[in-house]
Image: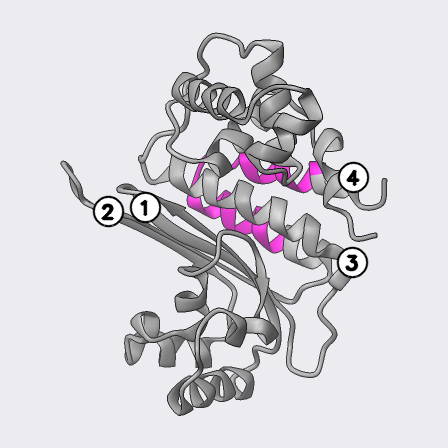
Amino acid sequence: MKHFNLTEELAHDISGADKEERLFAALSNAADRMGFDLFALAFDRRGGGGEGASMLVHNYPDAWANVYVGFDLSGTDPIRRAGEKSMTGFQWRNVDHYIPLSRGDRQLLKVARESGIGDGFTVPRHLPGEATGSCSFAVAPNARIPLEMLHAAEIVGAVALAAARQLIGTGSYTPRAALTERQRECVLWSARGKTAGETASILGISEETVVRHLKIARERYSVPCRQMLILCALFDGVIGFSDVYDWWRPL
């Protein structure tokens, strides 16, 4: 299993970060070992019944960070806007598959490149009613993005966002009663990218039953979406990275 051991090691290091500085160090190490030069994680918790909170950790060049913050570009950033349209990781070179790029968008990406940021890969996360975030890995201009590591980057980015969620006090999941074997199977096939209908065909049960099993599993972990359910199951050892990773590898 190519890259499996590295992915598991990096995910373990990141999930164990108990303060922002350790998360920065773990992400810096992960980016380097996956073949990227840069990383940036942004996580914003909505206020709701309490106060909002946010986290930003990155090693982007100061020239770009100063422009981005100074001109408050977060609202117009095409990569961020594309992340709001995607539930899975995407390469920046494909950003126009998600949103139409204006002249201003292209100019912003040009400035980023001139500031030392080339192509990249972003893992977005949306927790309805709670938070939004993204974890990006990038290379220097004219450098080759490590295509063979994008599936690892997807997992590492998701784990990093879960760690950020815990660190800013949104709350990590609390393990509940163990999932039944059938619920575990439904979560596993969901982690492998199968729809409820496809999982139903594989397991020989109805689609409605699959949907019900996944709903109960989310309730047991007190999480609102499929992505967080999968992360909880991975951290709990209900499913293993090796169970999932082979299915995410490109053929």
Disc 2 and disc 4: Cα gap in Å? 35 Å
Q: Is residue 91 left or right of residue 225?
A: right
Q: What residue is drawn where x is 26% and y is 42%?
A: 129
User: Mostly what secondary structure, the magenta segment?
Assistant: helix
Q: Amino acid at mark 1?
A: Ala
**Magenta stretch bounds:** 8-29
Q: Residues within 10 Å of mark 4 (few under 14, many from 20)?
A: some
Residue 169: x %, y % from top left: 31, 35
Which quarter of the image is occupied by the N terminus? top right
Contact? badges 1 and 2 (CB < 8 Å): yes
* Foreground tag (2 vs 4): 4
In the image, residue 17 above or below residue 205? below
Q: Residue furthest left?
A: 49
Q: Earlier in the sequence, mark 1 or mark 2?
A: 2
Disc 3 and disc 2: Cα gap in Å? 35 Å
Q: Which residue is mark 4?
A: 246
Q: What residue is drawn where x is 61% and y is 46%?
A: 156
* Foreground tag (4 vs 1): 4
Q: Earlier in the sequence, mark 3 or mark 1?
A: 1
Q: Earlier in the sequence, mark 2 or mark 4?
A: 2
Q: Amino acid at mark 3?
A: Glu
Disc 3 and disc 4: Cα gap in Å? 13 Å
State the mark number for residue 131. 1
Instruction: Label 1, secondary structure: give it.
Output: strand
- Which residue occupies the foreground of this view, 192 or 107? 192
Q: Earlier in the sequence, mark 3 or mark 2?
A: 2
Q: Amino acid at mark 4?
A: Asp
Residue 115: x %, y % from top left: 51, 84
Residue 151 belongs to magenta span: no
Q: Residues within 10 Å of mark 3 (few under 14, many from 20)?
A: some
Q: What residue is drawn where x is 54% and y is 41%?
A: 159
Residue 213: x %, y % from top left: 50, 19
